[in-house]
Image: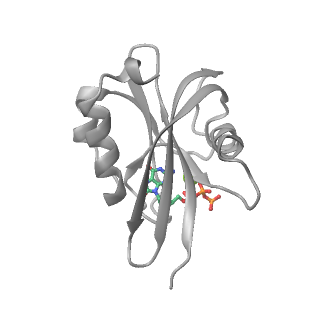
Amino acid sequence: MKKMVHVMVGVIWGEEQQILLAKRPEHLHQGGLWEFPGGKLEAGEEALSGLSRELQEELDIEVLEASPLMDVKHDYGDKQVFLDIWQVSRFKGEARGVEGQLLRWVPLAELDQYEFPAANATIVERLKSEKAPSLL
Ligand SMILES: Nc1nc2c([nH]c(=O)n2[C@H]2C[C@H](O)[C@@H](COP(=O)(O)OP(=O)(O)OP(=O)(O)O)O2)c(=O)[nH]1
Ligand SMILES: [Mg+2]
């Protein structure tokens, strides 16, 4: 059986209800697609610590407030992921692509215009079906 990778995923809200997307580098798993920033939880690490660490490493921001949104399990065939998705409602600093990744702040209504990994379809649906600020 393939091992399931626990991934911390941040839906980061900007001040005008936009969400931060990052483009995955071509050479990575699911490369060339847009994602919500995040990465693998380390052994023994708490979920929120892992999320904060990943967003610090990838975007150079400090998470000040975050809450769990949903989990998604997905089998890509070559890899099985458990996406642990949190909404980030407050953070410190200005996000930049530390690893050279392209970033874009996208209004909720325009999310469908971006190509995501297959596992993200349910996340996008969920975000569109609820009024963002009430979740926070
Ligand atoms: N960050 C993120 N990963 C996603 C999303 N959707 C999705 O299927 N994934 C998958 C793709 C990858 O298989 C996995 C994330 O692993 P990763 O390799 O980017 O993790 P990482 O940032 O810790 O990278 P690294 O330290 O191994 O370089 O989760 C998403 O929206 N955001
Ligand atoms: Mg990552």
Q: Is residue 29 above or below residue 113?
A: below
Q: Determine whether, in the image, residue 25 is placed left or right of residue 53.
A: left
Pick the front one: 66 or 77: 66
Question: Percent from the top left, x then y, of residue 94?
Answer: 60, 22
Residue, x 30% and y 49% (percent of image)?
122
Q: Determine whether, in the image, residue 96 is placed left or right of residue 76.
A: right
Question: Percent from the top left, x then y, of residue 30?
Answer: 41, 63
Q: Is residue 93 above or below residue 27?
A: above
Residue, x 47% and y 41% (percent of image)?
102
Q: Is residue 14 above or below residue 123?
A: above
Question: Percent from the top left, x then y, of residue 100?
Answer: 57, 45
Q: Residue furthest right?
A: 44
Residue, x 47% and y 74% (percent of image)?
79
- Counting the numbered discs, the total is 0
Residue, x 38% and y 78% (percent of image)?
77
Pick the front one: 55 or 103: 55
Pick the front one: 120 or 32: 120
Question: Percent from the top left, x then y, of residue 54?
Answer: 65, 45
